[in-house]
Image (spheres, rainbow, N blue to C red):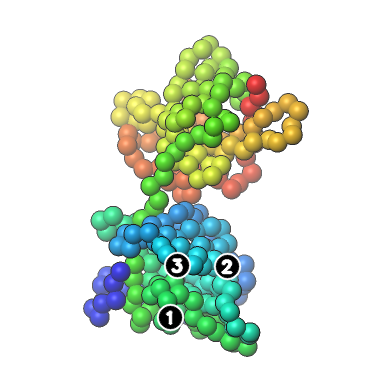
């Protein structure tokens, strides 16, 4: 965490970000607040072990070791600046915090987080500021506090990717060109109709969303597959629905796999292009 008096490159970038938020017309951002896909993830605070921020589409959850979890609803957004609200004790009061995400080139960090609302009692970055319910809540008037210069560095969660126990089996499938899909604890075997097998390891998981990777599908090239897998409870025929959420470019695997240079990071909410978009489902059955 930094609360320095000097102005870094990131601080100047943030001043510009706040200026944009302050002078942009309200018509650009009404009450419909949605976070960008690239920041929807579980984030750890680099310099504060045990502290985590979970960013979802329209909410954020802040957890600090030994403290009460704070759940925020996103009220308004402009670029990477967000005005959030939480429930607080007290009649006629809102709990408000404004934060800004700035991408950084910093060891052990993907973003810096800045507090853009006035300071409040509690965590320097995420403590809610008590605002009377008679005050009009606007990102233009409440999120102009770059002078607080409170900054934390965050990095993405280091996730252990495992397939659910109930999925670990050999399945028949409706996927074109596939004879069987076989799941183990950490991997999936894609078996074609001519019995060729392609092995994918479980690389990243966020609930029902998975990134699978096969190393060196070509020399120096990895193949990546993004899948959304959900159980179908009560369906008389199918046990799982499986949808691909990446745009494939590998003709040898029915345009399912995306090629990336070996070892290159592949981020779920940035690089799986079809995530949260309507995708044609396929199915698994015994």
Label 2 sits on residue: 73
* Element class at badge 2: strand
Q: Which mark is residue 247?
A: none
Label 1 sits on residue: 121
* Element class at badge 3: loop
Foreground mark, 3 or 1, reads: 3
Q: Quadrant of the C terminus?
A: top right
Residue at the left extreme of this rendering? 6
Tell me whether circle 1 and circle 2 mark residues in contact (CB < 8 Å).
no
Q: CA distance from mark 3 to mark 2?
A: 19 Å
Q: How many neighbours does mark 1 have within 10 angstroms: few (below 14), some (14-19), or many (20 or more)? A: few
Q: CA distance from mark 3 to mark 1?
A: 13 Å
Q: How many marks?
A: 3
* Element class at badge 1: loop
Of residues 256 and 63, the one drawn nearer to the viewer in this rendering: 63
Q: Which mark is residue 67?
A: 3
Give the mark nearest the N terminus, 3 or 1.
3
Q: Is residue 24 visible?
A: no
Residue beneath the point at 74% across and 34% down = 234
Above or below for 286 versus 148: above
Apparent side of residue 254 relative to residue 213 in the rendered image (left or right): right
Residue at the top extreme of this rendering? 194
């Amino acid at each position: 965490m930094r609360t320095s008096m000097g102005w870094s490159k990131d601080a100047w970038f943030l001043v510009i970000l706040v200026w944009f938020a302050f002078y942009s017309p309200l018509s650009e951002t009404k009450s419909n607040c949605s976070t960008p896909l690239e920041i929807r993830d579980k984030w750890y605070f680099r310099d504060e072990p045990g502290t985590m921020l979970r960013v979802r589409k329209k909410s954020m959850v802040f957890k600090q070791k030994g403290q009460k979890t704070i759940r925020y609803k996103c009220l308004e957004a402009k670029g990477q600046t967000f005005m959030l609200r939480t429930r607080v004790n007290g009649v006629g009061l809102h709990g408000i915090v404004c934060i800004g995400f700035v991408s950084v080139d910093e060891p052990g960090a993907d973003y810096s987080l800045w507090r853009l609302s006035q300071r409040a009692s509690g965590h320097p970055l995420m403590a809610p500021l008590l605002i009377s319910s008679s005050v009009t809540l606007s990102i233009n008037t409440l999120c102009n506090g770059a002078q607080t210069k409170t900054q934390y560095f965050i990095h993405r969660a280091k996730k252990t990717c495992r397939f659910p126990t109930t999925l670990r089996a050999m399945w028949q499938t409706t996927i074109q060109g596939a004879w069987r899909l076989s799941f183990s604890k950490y991997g999936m075997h894609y078996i074609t109709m001519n019995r060729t097998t392609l092995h994918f390891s479980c690389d990243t998981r966020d609930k029902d969303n998975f990134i699978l990777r096969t190393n060196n599908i070509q020399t120096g090239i990895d193949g990546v597959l993004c899948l959304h897998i959900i159980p179908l409870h009560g369906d008389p025929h199918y046990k799982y629905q499986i949808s691909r959420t990446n745009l494939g470019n590998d003709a040898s695997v029915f345009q399912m796999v995306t090629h990336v240079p070996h070892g290159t990071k592949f981020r779920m909410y940035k690089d799986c292009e079809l995530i949260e978009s309507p995708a044609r489902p396929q199915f698994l059955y015994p």
